[in-house]
Image (cartoon, grey):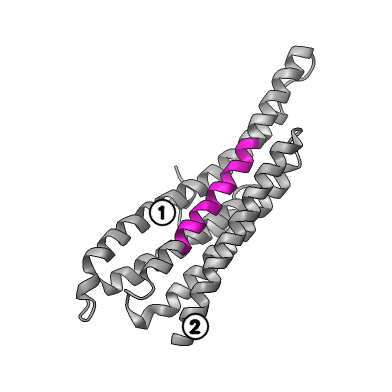
């Protein structure tokens, strides 16, 4: 069962409750999903439209790529919840004996890495999303260019907000060299996504 099996109202009711999940990580992944959905909408508005015949084959391939990305974003939203729950379960393990302490410490470390890799994966999906926008920007319905701009902004917002989970969870890693590696990965993804979004806005906004 995925986080989005319920309607939007039910999801938001759960979100605003005192339940720890869904939280910021899932919201970020769903924000990225909305970005992909806008990409797909613009592609759908262009496929079969007069004046874009030369791009039809290309757009059909782009539609398939974005459909896959949409599904991966949905998985990322669920993975965030799973990672959080795994983190809590590891901390609840017994620690009465030395063996239990070692097993618990190992479980916490593994759960922490999982809780870091989950948001990093969402950030990578955001990078793919803005890359897809750049590919279709001049080959889709000109009347829907504002939707692609909105999608780009959503991907950037998702990427930046998701990075906060990387920073928070990296604090729990005892291996600081490993923690720095993950933090650098997140920082680089923000730079990459923001750069592409900047390029999109520079080109697209004047065409509104």
Magenta-drawn stretch, dominant element (helix, strand or loop): helix
Q: Is residue 150 above or below residue 86?
A: below
* Quadrant in the rendering for residue 194: bottom right
Q: Count of labels shown?
A: 2
* Quadrant in the rendering for residue 162: bottom right
Q: Is residue 19 visible?
A: no
Q: In terms of depth relative to the viewer, which is nearer, 55 or 90? A: 55
Q: Which mark is residue 205?
A: 2
Badge 2 vs badge 1, beta-carbon distance below 8 Å: no
Magenta span covers which residues? 113-130
Q: Is residue 176 above or below residue 125?
A: above
Q: Is residue 208 above or below residue 63?
A: below
Residue depicted at 74% across the width and 20% down the height: 94
Q: CA distance from mark 2 to mark 1?
A: 25 Å
Residue depicted at 45% across the width and 79% down the height: 146
Element at label 2: helix
Q: Please provide percent x and percent y for residue 93.
A: 71, 24
Q: Is residue 125 magenta?
A: yes
Q: Is residue 72 visible?
A: yes
Q: Is residue 23 left or right of residue 9?
A: right
Q: In terms of depth relative to the viewer, which is nearer, 27 or 72? A: 72
Q: For the residue carrying disc 1, how many other residues have a C-alpha within 10 Å: few (<14), some (14-19), or many (20+)?
A: many
Q: Please provide percent x and percent y for residue 161.
A: 63, 59
Q: Quadrant of the N terminus?
A: top left
Residue assigned mark 1: 69
Q: Nearer the viewer, mark 2 or mark 1?
A: 2
């Amino acid at each position: 069962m995925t986080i989005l099996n319920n309607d939007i109202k039910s999801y938001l009711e759960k979100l605003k409750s005192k339940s720890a999940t869904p939280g910021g990580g899932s919201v970020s992944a769903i924000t990225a999903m909305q970005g992909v959905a806008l990409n797909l909408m613009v592609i759908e508005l262009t496929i079969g439209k007069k004046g874009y015949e030369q791009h039809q084959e290309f757009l059909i391939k782009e539609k398939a790529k974005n459909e896959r990305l949409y599904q991966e974003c949905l998985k990322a939203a669920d993975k965030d919840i799973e990672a959080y729950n795994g983190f809590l379960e590891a901390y609840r393990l017994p620690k009465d004996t030395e063996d239990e302490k070692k097993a618990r410490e190992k479980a916490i470390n593994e759960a922490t890495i999982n809780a870091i890799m989950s948001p990093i994966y969402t950030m990578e999906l955001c990078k793919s999303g803005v890359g897809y926008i750049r590919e279709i920007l001049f080959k889709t319905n000109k009347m829907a260019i504002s939707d692609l701009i909105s999608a780009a902004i959503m991907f950037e917002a998702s990427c930046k907000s998701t990075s906060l989970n990387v920073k928070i969870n990296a604090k729990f890693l005892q291996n600081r060299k490993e923690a720095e590696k993950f933090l650098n990965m997140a920082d680089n993804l923000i730079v990459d996504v923001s750069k592409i979004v900047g390029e999109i806005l520079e080109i697209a906004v004047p065409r509104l």
